[in-house]
Amino acid sequence: MAGPEQDPGGVVALARALIRCPSVTPDDGCGINALAAVLEGIGFSVTLLPFGEGAARTPNLFASLGTGQPHLCFAGHTDVVPVGDAAWTHDPFGGEIHDGILFGRGACDMKGGIAAFVAAVRLYLQKTPRLRGTISLLITGDEEGPATNGTVRVLEWMQANGQIPDFCLVGEPTNPGEMGEVVKIGRRGSLNARITVQGMQGHVAYPHRADNPIHRLLALLGELTAAPLDAGSEWFEPSSLQVTSLDVGNTANNVIPARAQARLNIRFNDLHTGADLAGWIRTVVARHAPKADVSIAISGESFLTTPDAPVEALRRAVHAVTGHVPKLDTGGGTSDARFISRYCPVAEFGLVGASMHKADEHVVLADLKQLTAIYSGFLEKVMG
Ligand SMILES: [Zn+2]
């Protein structure tokens, strides 16, 4: 792996070094510190931002190079999910390379993405001796966990310190099968609800002396699922409500139970807010079961970054390297981009995610080099 042709910007060496830090959430001091040292070597000023106490203490960093506008920020995480139960054929923290493929936990999600961005900055600075504007990195050690002391807290710190960027690029793996397929410009929101209907227990032969909570629960779920929530919007699929569990736990066939519970999840697009949907659920429930207990958790609102200049620059950079015009997409699960979207426009593009969170997670070295070229092309277009 010696020489610039084999390892442009040092992307492969850095990806291997990061994989060799066994930084399973929330234990990520090694990954953050290793990256901090590399960034300082390039000239970044690095601020370590550990937040939280005790076992919940999360390492994070903010690093910046240059001053003023334009300010482009790259966001990512150095923590990884556990190795899991399935057998690996390669050491998950060894950084082994076989036949042009680098194996290890975090190879594509997303130590490889971070390495590609750092390598791209090196390549960009070689071509551009005088940097105009600011390049920064927001890196957390808690994306795969509860995320309370990670990106959210770093963004608060960035705002307090006048470091909110003009645009943020998140390096999560966005491509399902090959490089260049998908740029994410938004994500759906997610809401979980638990509805517990209290009735009155009794003998099935004397229903007038009981109040069957299952019948009330079925009626309200029937109303909640009767019609689609919407037909989709310009950039989003239709919202979807899915009942995920019905629990009564009644073992007798001659007893009307005292309570019945259901859980549901809604993945919602930009035609709704979590609060609107929560209000709607509570209204429907109250109509059928006024004494029901409803608990609702909104794990993220939907967001959309309008595909203007920076998104177009990213799209062109992807096309120049891969030959594909990437689809602009808002599907999939949530990511830390949902927090960043409250402060500035954000888009996501990274590696091929097919092996993420699986045994033998890996990245093809050619993809790693392509991503480095895409990120440096994007830097040239945005920073000038
Ligand atoms: Zn990730």
Image (tube, rainbow, N blue to C red):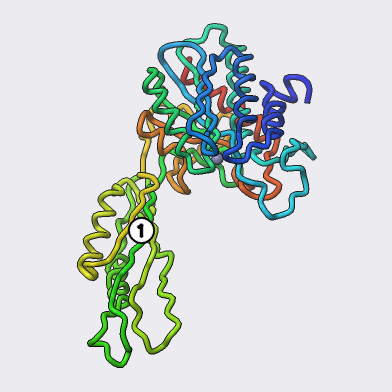
Q: Is residue 51 left or right of residue 191?
A: right
Q: Residue at 49% x, 11% y: name it.
A: 66
- Name the image quarter holding residue 98: top right
Question: Does residue 21 sit above or below 218 in this rendering?
Answer: above
Task: Read off the residue under disc 1.
Answer: 193
How far across and down, in percent of the image, does residue 288 sit?
23, 70
Give whichever of 328, 25 is nearer the camera.
25
Q: Residue at 47% x, 41% y: name it.
A: 335
**Count of numbered badges drawn on the protein:** 1
How far across and down, in percent of the image, does residue 238 sit?
36, 54
Give whichever of 31, 293 is nearer the camera.
293
How far across and down, in percent of the image, does residue 311 sit?
43, 30
Quadrant containing ligand 1 reads top right
Please identify the quadrant where the N terminus is shown: top right
Q: Residues within 10 Å of mark 1 (few under 14, many from 20)?
A: many
- Residue type indicated by callout 1: Ala
Q: Is residue 157 left or right of residue 90?
A: left
